[in-house]
Amino acid sequence: MPDGEFRATWPVLGTWTILDEGEVTGQHVVYTQPGVIEHYLETGTFPDGAVLIKELLEAEADEYSTGTAAYATDVTGWFVMVKDKQARFDGNDLWGLGWGWAYFDVDDRQTTTTSDYRFECKTCHVPAKQTDWIFIEGYPVLHTD
């Protein structure tokens, strides 16, 4: 898991607000390395080796002069995906479908808790199968219109 400097040096692809029965319960901020966005805009694909980090944060909502607003608070973990166009890790349960998949808990940044992407990651990404398993609709910087 990269150190926290990615927040200051990597571009943000987008932010997701998580709701539970209409209440804001979290925010997910997705980062990638410099150059990945430009490559995607030129080719419509993520370059080999591209890293996407989805930082999971708790969130709170409050009333402000502009209305009710939610804001992120404590980090709870990170989902990390690494583009693998060459299928380098065939047979490894963390690599498949053109990506490496892992989750890192806030209490241990060094060891993934993921053991098999097919059951722990892929199931959530099935709706994004047609867009290389990535929910690109949530990333405005990947759209030129």
Image (spheres, grey):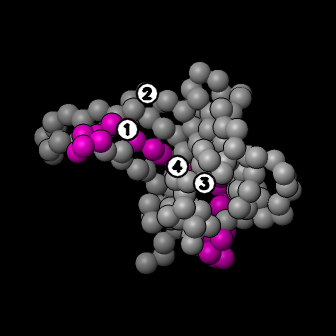
Q: Amino acid at mark 1?
A: Gly
Q: Amino acid at mark 3?
A: Lys
Find disc 2 in the rendering and name its residue: 74
Residue depicted at 45% across the width and 66% down the height: 137
Q: Earlier in the sequence, mark 4 or mark 2?
A: 4
Closer to viewer: mark 3 or mark 4 = 3
Q: Amino acid at mark 4?
A: Val
Q: CA distance from mark 3 to mark 4?
A: 17 Å
The numbered mark at residue 122 is 3
Q: Label 1 near label 2: C-beta < 8 Å?
A: no
The answer to whether any part of residue 10 appears in the image is no
Q: Amino acid at mark 2?
A: Asp
**Image position of 58 with respect to 49: above or below:** above
Q: Label 3 near label 1: C-beta < 8 Å?
A: no
Residue lying farthest to the front in this orientation: 119
**Residue 100 in picture, x, y percent from top left:** 72, 51
Find disc 4 in the rendering and name its residue: 30
Q: CA distance from mark 3 to mark 2?
A: 26 Å
Camera-side residue of 50 and 115: 115
Magenta range is: 20-45
Q: Is residue 98 magenta?
A: no
